[in-house]
Image: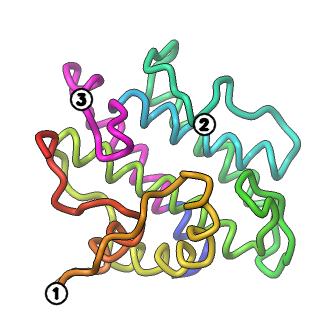
């Protein structure tokens, strides 16, 4: 899967999952640092806007994505839609062979393909967090998970030192590509709210 279709699939997964959140599910716990569904949405939208800002010099997120308030002041679907559209527009101006694209994560520049993979990683994994918390179908395809894992292995280790990712979990026999990606990111594919 090439970079731009991967990003589009990840953005669609995030948006579709947010659309599937029930009226009584906004405060449910998620696999993401035990943040609520609302906080994960704020974080995911904020990260997409951070990519937009890094690439274009435009406005970034209104609040710190790593300290989401848990209070939405706008429709969550509109928030995520605007953020993913902004990130996609920013990446559309980047050439696939660009070797130094500004990004909001250390080392603050990545080659275009890895940068898009990092942006897709963020959207896709938070789509999974929301889906897992709200009982929706798993939103990641095997092909997308495999492609995202390639990008993850290039960027995640330095970010673990910043606390952005938990330690990787041991692979399990029978893991598919989605489970392998999640375990690499320190997430238990079998997570439940009671765990």
Q: Which mark is residue 173?
A: 1
Quadrant assignment, res 107: bottom right
Residue at point 42% right, 37% down?
Answer: 40
Q: Which residue is label 3 attached to? A: 28
Q: Is residue 109 left or right of residue 34?
A: right
- How packed is label 1: few (under 14 Cα within 10 Å), some, or many (20 or more)? few
Q: CA distance from mark 1 to mark 2?
A: 35 Å
Residue under the point 44% across and 53% down: 12
User: Of residues 125 and 190, which is closer to you in this image?
Assistant: 190
- Residue 23 vertical placement versus 136 (above, below): above
Q: Indicate which disc residue 46 carries.
A: 2
Tell whether 71 sits left or right of 101: left
Residue 142 drawn at (x, y percent): 32, 77
Q: Is residue 55 left or right of residue 38?
A: right
| Rendering coords of residue 175 (x, y %) | 21, 81
- Residue 93, position as x, y percentages in the image: 82, 60
Look at the magenta stretch and give its main secondary structure. Answer: loop
Q: Secondary structure at mark 3?
A: loop
Residue at point 79%, 42% (across, down): 53
Q: Which mark is residue 48?
A: none
Q: Which residues are magenta?
A: 9-36
Q: Earlier in the sequence, mark 2 or mark 3?
A: 3
Residue at 76% across, 77% down: 96
Magenta-drawn stretch contains 144: no
Nearer to us in this view, 120 or 149: 149
């Amino acid at each position: 899967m090439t970079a731009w279709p991967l990003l589009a699939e990840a953005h669609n997964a995030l948006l579709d999952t947010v659309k599937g959140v029930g009226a009584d599910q906004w405060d449910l716990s998620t696999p993401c640092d035990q943040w609520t569904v609302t906080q994960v949405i704020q974080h995911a939208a904020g990260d997409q806007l951070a990519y937009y800002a890094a690439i274009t010099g435009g406005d970034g997120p209104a609040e710190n994505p790593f300290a989401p308030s848990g209070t939405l002041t706008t429709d969550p679907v509109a928030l995520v839609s605007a953020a993913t559209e902004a990130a996609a527009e920013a990446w559309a101006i980047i050439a696939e062979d660009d070797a130094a694209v500004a990004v909001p994560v250390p080392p603050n520049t990545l080659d275009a393909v890895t940068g898009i993979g990092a942006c897709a990683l963020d959207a896709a994994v938070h789509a999974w967090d929301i889906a897992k918390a709200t009982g929706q179908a798993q939103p990641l395809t095997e092909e997308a998970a495999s492609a995202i894992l390639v990008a993850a292995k290039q960027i995640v280790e330095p970010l673990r030192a910043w606390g952005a990712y938990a330690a990787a979990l041991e692979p399990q026999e029978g893991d598919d590509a989605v489970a392998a990606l999640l375990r690499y990111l320190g997430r238990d594919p079998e997570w439940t709210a009671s765990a």
